[in-house]
Image (spheres, grey):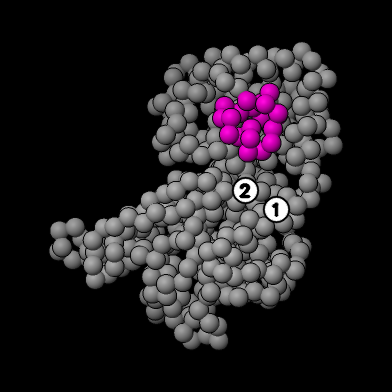
């Protein structure tokens, strides 16, 4: 099978030294090479701009060991408009049009394709802003022209459904961390630009598992280690991160008033933070944060954006040996956690932390119980994640994937080049 693969709204970065301040830098690159390793009989066509061709021959060979990753942009001729390039690539190459697509959700404006979406007053075509044209429009135009079916993927609900009103060919399904439905508003066709609505199912495929396919199982701690920091919070609180949740209010109630020594690590709107608490909010590079994580005993998770559940952050906390508590009962059910880790209010949270601190046997029992969840092989070899991907490829597109390979290349997005890593990349989830 030929599979179109990429990400809306940004280029795909394979060079791990560039994984940094912008969130989700690694996920689409890891997705591409793990699929290429596990499904050697299929070909994967990179639809997004990318830096694959700049990799060293050695790394490129490790990633593309089956010679089934094709970079559509490697020989891009700049004399052609970039929005026409994907169509031209398939017209002039030996390859057939992809059977379907798997595309990571991302940032987009309402207008992505040039000379396509009419202005509301009918005076001409709206002009897409640069990033929408160059990083989203190159894909949306191809999807409209070919009509190939595709899925969107991702755990950051701020980015789906894709905002582009000029995307007529909408995704069949969004593969994420929750079962729900979203509604996309878009024009009916180029000829009929009436705005219509398309409902798209969102399915929980356990996207949080994806973050472990690229990590080293041997990094897991064999036993609890001595720790001197009681609670640390790793969380963003910018406007885009709390449209439907008052994150600052929750942090003030659960943390600032209860644990006076606790620091909050992440991006926050400074004007929202009260003066007496400002020195407790810090945006810090990952190279400085890792020691803090290994010294922390507990954290609190309040879930993802727009009411979505906690995702990959849960597994990342376990990798550092931290015990997470949750304010959402659905997270307890989702990860199969002890009910004890659900806290109904700030008083409950404080009392439960204190109960573990006063009973070392109970603390160790809780630690080993949740650590057992991350020590299952199918989380690390990609099988649990791709079992769910395959299910919906079969259901929506009618294709049966043949998984005969194994993942042999890993490049950590957590521990590699710590001086380059960032909070946004690591804790977006």
Image spot of residue 53 (x, y percent)? 60, 71
Q: Residues within 10 Å of mark 2 (few under 14, many from 20)?
A: many
Q: Do tag 2 and tag 1 residues touch (Cβ < 8 Å)?
A: yes
From the image, which quarter does the C terminus lie in?
A: top right
Mark carried by residue 384: 1
Please give the name of the residue rendered at 62% of the width and 19% of the height, measured from the top-left corner.
349
Image spot of residue 354 (x, y percent)? 70, 14
Q: Nearer the viewer, residue 319 or 244?
A: 244
Range shown magenta: 323-342
Q: Above or below — where is 339 with respect to 358?
A: below
Q: Nearer the viewer, residue 244 or 261?
A: 244
Q: Is residue 75 left or right of residue 37?
A: left
Please give the name of the residue rendered at 58% of the width and 13% of the height, measured from the top-left corner.
347
Mark carried by residue 206: 2
Asked if the magenta segment contains residue 338, the reply would be yes
Q: Nearer the viewer, residue 93 or 151?
A: 151
Q: Earlier in the sequence, mark 2 or mark 1?
A: 2
Image spot of residue 63 (x, y percent)? 69, 67
From the image, which quarter does the N terminus lie in?
A: bottom right
Dot 1: element = helix
Q: Above or below — where is 340 with respect to 136?
A: above
Q: Give the quadrant of residue 306.
A: top left
């Amino acid at each position: 099978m030929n599979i179109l693969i990429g990400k809306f709204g940004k280029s795909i970065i394979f060079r791990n030294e560039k994984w940094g301040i912008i969130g989700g830098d690694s996920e689409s690159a890891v997705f591409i090479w793990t699929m290429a390793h596990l499904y050697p009989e299929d070909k994967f066509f990179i639809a997004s701009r990318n830096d694959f061709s700049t990799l060293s021959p050695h790394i490129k060979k490790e990633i593309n060991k089956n010679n089934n990753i094709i970079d559509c942009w490697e020989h891009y001729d700049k004399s052609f408009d970039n929005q026409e390039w994907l169509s031209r690539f398939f017209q002039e190459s030996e390859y057939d049009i992809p059977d379907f697509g798997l595309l990571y959700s991302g940032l987009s404006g309402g207008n992505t394709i040039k000379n396509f979406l009419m202005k509301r007053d009918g005076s001409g075509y709206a002009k897409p802003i640069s990033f929408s044209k160059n990083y989203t429009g190159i894909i949306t135009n191809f999807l409209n022209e070919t009509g190939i079916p595709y899925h969107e993927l991702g755990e950051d609900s701020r980015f789906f459904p894709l905002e582009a009103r000029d995307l007529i060919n909408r995704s069949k399904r969004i593969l994420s961390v929750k079962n729900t439905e979203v509604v996309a508003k878009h024009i009916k066709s180029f000829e009929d630009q009436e705005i219509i609505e398309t409902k798209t199912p969102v399915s929980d495929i356990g996207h949080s598992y994806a973050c472990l396919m690229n990590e080293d199982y041997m990094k897991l701690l064999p036993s609890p280690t001595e720790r001197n920091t009681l609670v640390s919070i790793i969380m963003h609180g910018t406007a885009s991160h709390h449209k439907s949740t008052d994150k600052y209010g929750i942090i003030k109630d659960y943390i600032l008033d209860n644990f006076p020594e606790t620091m909050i690590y992440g991006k926050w709107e400074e004007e929202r933070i009260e003066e007496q608490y400002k020195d407790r909010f810090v945006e810090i590079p990952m190279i400085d944060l890792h020691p803090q994580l290994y010294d922390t005993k507990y954290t609190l998770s309040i879930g993802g954006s727009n009411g979505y559940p906690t995702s990959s952050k849960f597994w990342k906390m376990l990798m550092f040996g931290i015990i997470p508590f949750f304010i959402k009962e659905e997270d307890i059910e989702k990860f199969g956690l002890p009910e004890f880790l659900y806290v109904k209010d700030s008083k409950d949270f404080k009392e439960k932390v204190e109960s573990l601190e006063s009973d070392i046997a109970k603390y160790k029992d809780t630690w080993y119980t949740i650590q057992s969840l991350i020590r299952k092989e199918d989380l690390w070899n990609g099988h649990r994640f791709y079992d769910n991907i395959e299910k919906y490829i079969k259901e929506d597109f009618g294709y049966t994937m043949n998984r005969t390979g194994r993942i042999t290349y890993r490049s950590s997005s957590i521990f590699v080049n710590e001086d380059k890593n960032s909070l946004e990349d690591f804790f977006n989830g």
